[in-house]
Image: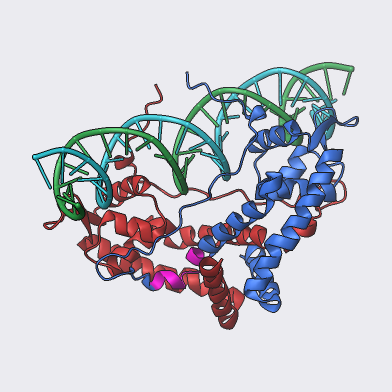
Chain colours: A blue, B red, C cyan, D green
Amino acid sequence: MTVSKTASDAARLPRPLRREPVDPAGDDGMLQLGELSGLLGYSLKRAQLKVFEDFLRCVAPLQLTPAQFSVLLLLDKNPGRNQTEIANTLGILRPNFVAMLDALESRDLCARMRSANDRRSHILVLTERGRAVLARAKKLVANKHEARLIEVLGPANHAALLEMLAKLAQEF
Amino acid sequence: MTVSKTASDAARLPRPLRREPVDPAGDDGMLQLGELSGLLGYSLKRAQLKVFEDFLRCVAPLQLTPAQFSVLLLLDKNPGRNQTEIANTLGILRPNFVAMLDALESRDLCARMRSANDRRSHILVLTERGRAVLARAKKLVANKHEARLIEVLGPANHAALLEMLAKLAQEF
DNA sequence: GACATTTGATATATTCGATAACAATTATCA
DNA sequence: TGATAATTGTTATCGAATATATCAAATGTC
């Protein structure tokens, strides 16, 4: 029992990321966040959810999640790599990467090719369609998603934010 | 079949948040991230995972997750509120908040009290122990977690980062 | 008083991240 | 060379987070 769809045929349509916090118009209005608003982790998570939400909206015509987009980007930039290498670079565990690839391959965005040198590994390649979709996705991301971020933050702040986040991801 | 622990007795010990990305020492070394490093969403998520990881380490003696800490903070700051109000403020759906509260209540950190006015709702209160744990947690967070963040980023950058994240969470 | 709404709760589905184990292949080295 | 170890992709499975539908009890509305 518990027959579940095989991952290979899941088109994997993105769904809502997380519920919005609600300002409850209770007795005397909004609740006090207190120290919560000063907690960097809390603000990071809230902001990340919003940004992913906007990413999904902007790339909705192509039906790509942030994770799928990052895979396509990486395949394009790093030809001739196998599943382990791509998954490791993105912090995805190999077992979980299998279903992700199944979904992308079923949409003819990428393909697994058996390596001649090492017949254990699959060399990952973007298909023609994969390259086309990636090109369109890049434009949507740049012109709609990132453009809006830069507009809200201001170009200088946007750059500073990126730099700080990179530092956190590295040195922390 | 599929007998699962009831949520009410789960002590809910935090576990590793996400796999680290790996610099694969492949043929010619590290893979190229390309446009990925300029994607704000990507950096946001990576940074958020690192920060949560550090939070868990710092508060490990008290066995509190970021979500649990935020609940305790909110209960302390907003006495006399019910489950719906607290859950809404944190962006948690009421059905999912039930198990969270069960876990906190089973550890005697908070309690549900039936309201006299409205016998449907549960007024949430911190217990004595809840207040003590929260006080200790606040100190750990300030002196270990946030202190390290400020040290890595610098105080001015830390403040600027908080401000930008708040803006993203609000205006985006 | 009939009907709708709210509250906490249960059951359940989906997605994501994690571990264990396996077959096929390749690497190591006694 | 041949036994043994390690790697690769894969499956099965688990746990946690997030989502929906639905329910009984209590309350609100008309």
Residue B68 visible here: yes
Is residue A67 magenta-colored? no
Tell me: residue D21, above or below residue A35: above
Q: Residue at x 42, y 61 (%)?
A: B59
Relative to the observer, which residue lies in front, B52 or C5?
C5
Q: Position of residue A66 (x, y in %)?
A: 66, 50
Q: Position of residue B75 (x, y in %)?
A: 29, 63
Relative to the observer, which residue lies in front, B68 or B162?
B162
Q: Residue at x 34, y 42 (%)?
A: B10
Q: Residue at x 26, y 71 (%)?
A: A28
Disc tally is 0
Q: Is residue A171 left or right of residue A106?
A: left
Q: Position of residue C4 (x, y in %)?
A: 27, 45
Quadrant of the rendered image containing residue A99 = top right
Q: Is residue B117 left or right of residue B45?
A: left
Tell me: residue C7, above or below residue A48: above
